[in-house]
Amino acid sequence: MPPPLVELSSISVFRGERLVLKNISTHLEACQALLLTGPNGAGKSTLLRVIAGLCPVSSGTMERPCDVAWLGHLDALKPALTVRENLQFSLKLGQGTLKDCLASLSLTALADRPVRLLSAGQKRRVALARITLSKAPLWLLDEPSVGLDQASLEQLGTIMNTHLAQGGGIIATSHVPLPLGHHHTLKLQAPPVPAGVFL
Amino acid sequence: MNSAFRALTARELRLAFFFGADTLASLLFFILCAALFPLALGPSPALLHQMGPGILWVCMLLAGFPPLERLFNQDFEDGSLDQLMLYGVGPAGVALSKIITHWMTTGIPLLIAAIPLGLMFGLESREFPVLLGSLALGSASLSLIGGMIAAISLGARRGNILLPLLGLPLSVPILIFGAAASYAAQLGLSPASNLYLLGACFCLCLPLCPLAAGMGLKEACR
């Protein structure tokens, strides 16, 4: 049996003085998707950052033997560069061709347009295009559907389900249902505010 | 790892080339700064010749700072830094590639501009090799130190004030040894000892500054 893509055992994370994640355990195998849900401030993005290795855990252990492709809540695009130029760097290190990748997200017509002229949803699609170029087996997506219209949402579903079918894994946060086939859900609770904090 | 690092540095250079105004601003600042000294000190050729290397060194030091502020800040603000941290070159690799870019897009243009400015101060041709050599070595060390401070102060409020406040004192040894080496030809001394010390500073900065900068980036991204 192959090792899991991610294994978290009872991790806790402090950010500053605040306990953001308390005693979280979960794991993800190949071909599986995990949806993180919970109210604002429950630590969904923090958990994703922990899995990416950007944020250290305060206790517990996190095992992640594979590479990740990261989609943060910011699109990480350079406004002055065109769509094609923005994706060039990922293309060099990743897999696939720009043509297929742009076509899968209906971006072909926008390829030579500077990113600053795109709408929020179009920018999100370019950021998603970068994910599909990556070779990493594990995708970490922070609110991937923000700003997407219905047609793009379906394309996102196709892309994610193809990735799962090819043996990848996805961990995503979302407030709205994502067009994922079979997936697990991890519901995070907002940690109670300790008494006396507002004194 | 190596090819990823090269791809990353190529990306940084392309971006720096695209935002060429930074290089131009730093270059103009250097030229203007150096051109102000004759106005204040008076037109005496002997005095300017004597002051020349020192003025060029101080102006070089100051002109390198403004572009440092944008070195990590833009990538930090638009989320690109998170992406870069995950590219597999490690935080220190990201920092080193940015520092190399800073030196290539700021250090080298300033070195070239130092030639006409040196002529303006009436420096003799025999003084140029050591002056330019020490400036090249010194500017590389200054890029390393500046990059480290820029990474450490990343995300801090008033980061733009912290940058020169922390960076200029750390640059003092480079300034002392570099300027002393540049004066050797004028005073008829050997520049060797000061160049060795300047080289030693560079050898110290080369491994330490990217590591410290990497720690700063990691802390900013958590």
Image (cartoon, coloured by chain):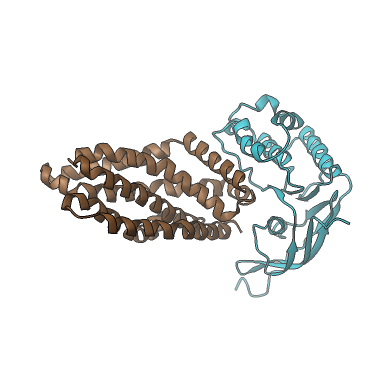
Q: Residue at x 69, y 69 (%)?
A: A193
Number of residue marks: 0
Q: Give x and y (percent) for residue B180.
A: 24, 56
Chain letter for cyan, please. Answer: A
Using the image as rendered, state which of residue B9 and residue B3 is in the foreground. Answer: B3
In the picture as drawn, the residue positioned furthest to the bottom comes out as: A196
Residue B48: image x %, image y %?
15, 45
List x then y, in percent, for residue B109. Answer: 37, 39
- State the hue of chain B: brown
Q: Is residue B184 above or below residue A190?
A: above
Camera sees residue B174: no
Q: Is residue B85 visible?
A: yes
Closer to the camera in the image, B65 or A191: B65
The answer to whether residue B124 is left or right of residue B202 is: left
The C terminus of chain B sits in image quarter = bottom right
Q: Is residue A64 above or below residue B27?
A: below
Q: Which quadrant of the view contains residue A13?
A: bottom right
Which residue appears at 79% of the width and 47% of the height?
Answer: A176
Q: Residue B91: where, in percent of width, then height?
A: 57, 55
User: In the image, is A186 to the left or to the right of B152?
Assistant: right
- Residue B27 or residue B205, whichever sits in front: B205
Tell me which corner region of the image, top left, top right, bottom left or bottom right, holds residue A58.
bottom right
